[in-house]
Amino acid sequence: MIAITDIPDQVETNQSFSIKGTTSNDLIGEQINLTIDNQFRSVGGQVADDGSWQVDFVFLSPGDRRMTITIGGETQTRNIEVGVATPSLRITNLPAQIKTLESFVIEGEADDLEDGEELLIRIDRRFDVATPVVQGGKWQATLVLSQGGQRLLEVIVSDQERIQTNINVTTDTDIITRQVWGAPSTPSGLPTLNAKRITLHHTVNVTLSPNASQATEFQRMRKIRNGHVNGNNWSDIGYHYVIMPSGRIYEGRYNRKRGAHDGINDGFGIAFDGSYHLPGSRITDAQFNSAVALCIRLCQRIGITDPTVSVSTPTAFPGRPNRNLPRIIGHRDRFNTACPGMGEGTSIRMAEIRQAVKAAL
């Protein structure tokens, strides 16, 4: 025979609980079978040598649930009332409108978590984008997403406790993400970027046709990353964005991580793919327009209101002297290089980009 010695009358969804009992000696070692609502079956281990047994379970849906324990042909049945658990983790503020490249704040509350405990915010079950810390039962995080569309946002305490919500991210400037062109995620251990400016580059690759296929551009992006990772021994591609002659913008290094592109790396790195140091070379109008649109977004994100005004800027020249430079600069402005092309940025239309961004801001 079997007997139930301990079973709760009421539990909540997602709450782990145990059913305990005893058996006669002839059932020692027998398998414990659990049937829920006369249809869902589960195996719960074996009867111990002293005749005791235990089944652990978690209900995911509420209601008056029927639990039947079967051991060696003997059965016992009990009902458990399952209520809806009040979530210990909640989102209290999430903007109704979220745009790519624009920062937004998500806020929430967390019960039963001590100050200093760290949460994890994950996008699309793949990308870890923030680790807010609980203080006084509340938490918040500032996020920036570069890919539009329907995205799954998760706030995670542990494998067993998380909340999920779908967010719709709109975009004015399409950016082809690194997973699309075939790159793994940026290593999470890289330093966080506190962006203060934008540095423009050129890749010095053979310039593609503006009509090049996306497959060709994908291959080019993989070539750039491979050169940076395997040639330069960097952890990832150095630029945050690459703009092709077609005008298509490609995501490089995750834009919350410090790049490897201008010797100081205290800002976003944007590269025009192609060689613009050659006499007569010039970025396409499509590249220009994309660069302006992207720089507008990035300036808005970090609070640049006039990219033409010069400010004291550290450089990588010997002695690291500061120079007065605009907030949108060329690689050569702070490092000994010919990048991003012809002098004064004429081939990448540096001055025109600054003025167009200023006008829009």
Image (spheres, rainbow, N blue to C red):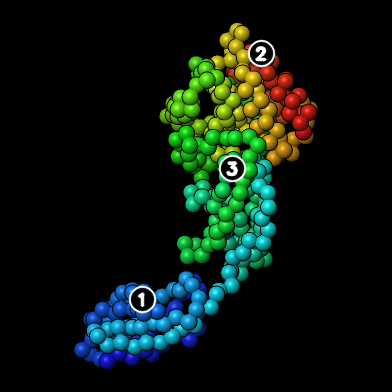
Residue 137 versus residue 55 in the image, above or below: above
Q: Secondary structure at mark 3?
A: loop
Question: Residue 241's x, y, as percent?
Answer: 57, 31
CA gap, disc 2 and disc 3: 36 Å
- For mark 1, does the 10 Å Cα neighbourhood hold few (<14), some (14 to 19), or many (20 or more) residues? few
Residue labelled with disc 3: 148
Residue labelled with disc 1: 39
Residue labelled with disc 2: 343
Q: Looking at this view, name the residue that lies furthest to the top.
A: 279
Residue 85, quarter of the rendered image = bottom right
Whether residue 271 is visible to the viewer of this picture, yes or no, is no
| Residue at x 55% of width, y 61% of height | 163
Q: Secondary structure at mark 2?
A: helix
Question: Residue 24's x, y, as percent?
Answer: 25, 91
Q: Earlier in the sequence, mark 2 or mark 3?
A: 3
| Residue at x 55% of width, y 19% of height | 210
Amino acid at dot 2: Gly
Question: Residue 6's x, y, as percent?
Answer: 41, 88
Q: Nearer the viewer, residue 274 or 175?
A: 175
Amino acid at dot 3: Gly
Give left or right: position of 264 versus 186: right
- For mark 3, does the 10 Å Cα neighbourhood hold few (<14), some (14 to 19), or many (20 or more) residues? many
> Which image quarter holds the N terminus?
bottom left
Residue 138 versus residue 323 in the image, above or below: below
Residue 201 versus residue 106 in the image, above or below: above
Q: Earlier in the sequence, mark 1 or mark 3?
A: 1
Q: Nearer the viewer, residue 177 or 171?
A: 171
CA gap, disc 1 and disc 3: 43 Å
Amino acid at dot 1: Gln
| Residue at x 54% of width, y 35% of height | 176
Residue 347 got which mark? Answer: none
Q: Earlier in the sequence, mark 2 or mark 1?
A: 1
